[in-house]
Image (cartoon, helix red, strand yellow):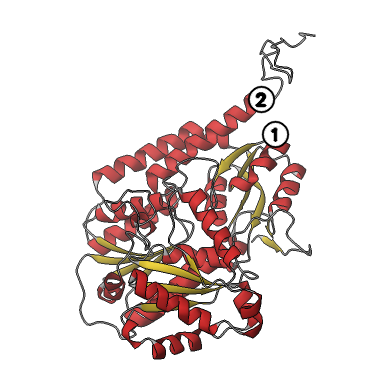
Amino acid sequence: MAEIVLPTKALAVNPLKASQPIGASLAFLGLAQAMPLEHGARGCTSFNKLFFMRHFRDPIALQTTAMDQMTTVLGADSRVIEALATICDKNQPAVIGLISTGLSEIQGADIPRTVAAFRASCPHHDGVAVIPVSAADTLGCLETGFAAAVEAMIIALIPSAPSAVRRPGQVNVLASAMLTPGDIEAIKSWIGAFGLTPIVLPDLADSLDGHLIEAGFSTLTYGGTPRSAVAAMTESVATLVIGPSLDYAADLLQARTGITDHRFPGLLGLDDCDAFTQALAGISDCPVPSALERKRAQLQDAMVDCQFQLGGARVAVAADADLLATFTRFLVAMGAEVVAAVASAQAGHLAHLPTDSVVIGDLEDLEWLAREHAAELLITNSHGAEIARRLGTALLRAGFPVYDAYGAHARTWVGYGGSRQLLFDLANLLAGHYQEIRPYRSRYRQETPHDGKIRRPNPC
């Protein structure tokens, strides 16, 4: 059992987490013909949109109610109704995700009542699903906001009565915020290898994988899970839940559909991949395809190749809870020592991680712990680049946001292939780090001083 160390600082000095509204908006970007609408100040939404555009390097469908001083004090219900009506008139979305922010939550906005007022004043827009989500900035993180949005989708879009019809081969997938579009694409192929058809909620692989469309630009999400497909989740034969943050959403779905679910803490490493593969084999009643067996053998060989580089390596990890737990289990299984584990927000499953303690904190905590325990490798988002530079450690960029490397959204971490590539990346980063430590550095290596003149170091 890991000790959970709660924060004692009055503020975050070097923030690790992204806010709940970012997570909730990200979830709605995985629905087809959707528009996330953040009920808050214009600057907050602009900031969130900038994060998305730097991470995914694509235009992002995101709107705001643009609360100002006047509406914050006197009430912004009319602003919400006006925004909903404008989006419906101009864009004709299938779904609008109405997301509260810290400003509207502190104001005390009654979002459900405002949605009812919109329905009464605009009955001609009854065909548009408006899904309210409570996502205060002061609580949780991206992961919890994402989970709250998935729960709201299930309540709003999935009938509460179980269906008597079952579509053979159709399975539901609840995908955690820790999964990239590349991960979800790989999971869909993994499921398809057993002859099964997945309905992913939300499907970021279909909307944020970076593909071009003939129209060139769309004011709504292009790709993602259609509203009709979400409703059809009641007719699936099984549900696959990836990530502990979606446990409550899985409970809601199971209560509404009566469908048996299979829950996985992650899909990284041999044990996790084997558990997922065996579940698919049981659901489909089919043998494991030979292509998957070969990928498994390749992962095993990579584990043998990299064990001496990773064994005993001191690693510091900072991320949202699901991703932190997945990396920690994977690293410990490979013989590495997780000397610092920092989570952006508390989660019950963190207490079961194979490490001494988990700190609920920020990147300042990560830097302090990494320095104290002489970490050789950091794993966190792009905000950790300066820390790695100050400490002289290697950095593996993971999580959100990753804005100083191309293809972060397209990277596949999960599965036998993703796990194998991660092993190679970790081993290469550590090998490169060790080469920079004396006595491994050659004394004849050329160095370039600040004046630009190339000199050889003094051999003595």
Residue shown at 62%/73% (left/top)? 68
Left or right of 166, for residue 355: right
Q: Nearer the viewer, residue 420 or 225?
A: 225
Q: Which residue is mark 1?
A: 392
What label does residue 170 carry, if any? none
Q: Nearer the viewer, residue 459 or 37?
A: 37
In what element is the residue under mark 1?
loop
Q: Amino acid at mark 1?
A: Gly
| Mark closer to the chain start, 2 or 1 | 1
From the top left corner, tell me how far across and down residue 125 is, in percent: 33, 82
Q: Nearer the viewer, residue 140 or 45?
A: 45
Left or right of 47, for residue 193: left
- Residue at mark 2 to residue at mark 1: CA–CA distance: 9 Å
Dot 2, how many residues are within 10 Å of its Cα: few (below 14), some (14-19), or many (20+)? few
In what element is the residue under mark 2?
loop
Inspect this view and state whether residue 245 appears.
no
In contact (CB < 8 Å): disc 2 and disc 1: yes
| Vertical comparison of 122 with 220: above or below | below
Left or right of 418, for residue 234: left
Dot 1, how many residues are within 10 Å of its Cα: few (below 14), some (14-19), or many (20+)? some
| Vertical comparison of 383 with 22: above or below | above
Residue shown at 58%/28% (left/top)? 431
The quadrant of the image that shows the N terminus is: bottom right
From the top left corner, tell me how far across and down residue 342 is, in percent: 66, 55
| Vertical comparison of 358 with 84: above or below | above
The quadrant of the image that shows the C terminus is: top right
Q: Which residue is mark 2?
A: 436
From the top left corner, tell me how far across and down residue 245 is, in percent: 51, 66
Q: Amino acid at mark 2?
A: Glu
Q: Nearer the viewer, residue 89 or 356?
A: 89
From the top left corner, tell me how far across and down residue 183 is, in percent: 40, 51
